[in-house]
Image (cartoon, rainbow, N blue to C red):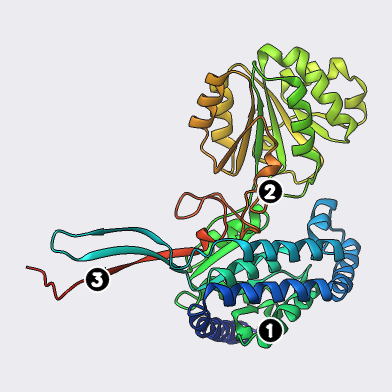
Amino acid sequence: MTNNEETAVAGAVFEAVCARADAAARAQRALARADTDAKNRLLHAIADALDARAGEVETANAADMAASREAGMDAGKLDRLLFDAPRVHAAAEGVRHVASLPDPVGEIVRGYNLPNGMRLTQTRVPIGVIGMIYEARPNVTVDVASLCLKSGNAAILRGGHAAERTNAATLAVIGDVLRAEGFDPALVATVDDFGRDGATAMMEARGHVDLLVPRGGKGLIRAVVENSKVPVIETGAGNVHIYMDASGDPAKAIPIIINAKTQRVGVCNAAEKLLVHERVAATFLPVAAAALLDAGVTLHADERAYAIIDAAAPQAAADGLLTHATAEDWDTEYLALEMGVKVVDSLDEAVDHINAHSTGHTEAIVAEDYTAVEEFTARIDSAVVMVNASTRFTDGGVFGFGAELGISTQKMHARGPMGLREMTTTKWIGYGRGQVRA
């Protein structure tokens, strides 16, 4: 294909994507007038349809899973890609939970009277058309649809090639319900049929798409943040740390570390680094390492941690489960059964190391010393800080949001798990009685 032909194709895709976004915007304006009861009925109908047609989605997902296994997709990504009947039913329950939550649209954030008698109110309103670019996460299709519909927004989705069949089956269910309930199916649309060109067009569709949210690996998020002309909320990448303080209780720490690292390795809230205070390293690290090694975790350790672990478990290095950490390890989100381990001299060093290498997602401290806890929580510059608890709790469902658009790691508008409120903006309304400005 010549350069001119490629330009023509890209231009045609851009026009088509903008047309879909504009159709979504028209549908969104009608949705914005719907009351909470109507939106909740719609969500319950979607949940019921997902339950009834879970087999269709599972069949489509089985084809995606088989193709991805054949293509060599790693275990962590395959786990994210899986959307079998039990996960579809779980997603349907999430939709019902969203329906049960308070509707943020119309909420008065604040209001007051000016000296001239004018009444000002700041009110929550939908953002408009929200674009999502994500990969190998078919549950996100349901989460985004339910959150957007409840908050009065339309959704334009690019779910990636790996989950294309699953997403198509899921969107077919949602589209049928939208029609049956009297809503325009353009409210939840996809650009998957345009492939990567569709994602590029979404990034360029300023004035058609109001907000873009990428959800996936570091490369995807960086590409969207660096290339998008549409406003972006940065999400997802999780170089997540657990710090074992000198005052930490090992009986709490070991289950927290194992859960955070191994319960689901391919998710952004899984722990990737373990920092241990030097005062407890000699006694704690052999126990922690034994538990991690038993779980099949490869440890990338700094010199002090390596020496302690190697002395306690000399076979680990020979088996390839203990290696010397490199500078790159401290910035790596493994999304696998791997973990960086470092001994630090103080809480100050732990905080400095985390703030230097974290992606701003979630960090945890295991400590009994209240002063240490207060120092850590005050000084860590991440969206979520856990105290004596697993990092796996950073999740919109766990936080009571029913679902999440993603975990925002930026500092504007939304930070941490993004639920219904984070999918609204505000507008000011001034009520006067003929006042004019002097």
Relative to 269, say whether 179 is above or below: below
Relative to 302, say whether 166 is above or below: below
> Does the image show residue 112?
yes
Q: Which residue is mark 3?
A: 431
Q: Which residue is mark 2?
A: 268
* Tag shown at residue 1: 1
Residue 242: quarter of image: top right
Q: Is residue 174 left or right of residue 11?
A: right
Quarter of the image for the N terminus: give it. bottom right
Residue 201: quarter of image: bottom right
Q: Residue 326: image x %, image y %?
A: 71, 32
Please, what secondary structure does the residue beneath circle 3 have?
strand
Q: Earlier in the sequence, mark 3 or mark 2?
A: 2
Please, what secondary structure does the residue beneath circle 1 have?
loop
Q: CA distance from mark 2 to mark 1?
A: 39 Å
Q: Is residue 297 left or right of residue 423?
A: right
Q: CA distance from mark 3 to mark 2?
A: 45 Å
Q: Residue 83: image x %, image y %?
A: 82, 64
- Front position among marks 3 and 2: 3
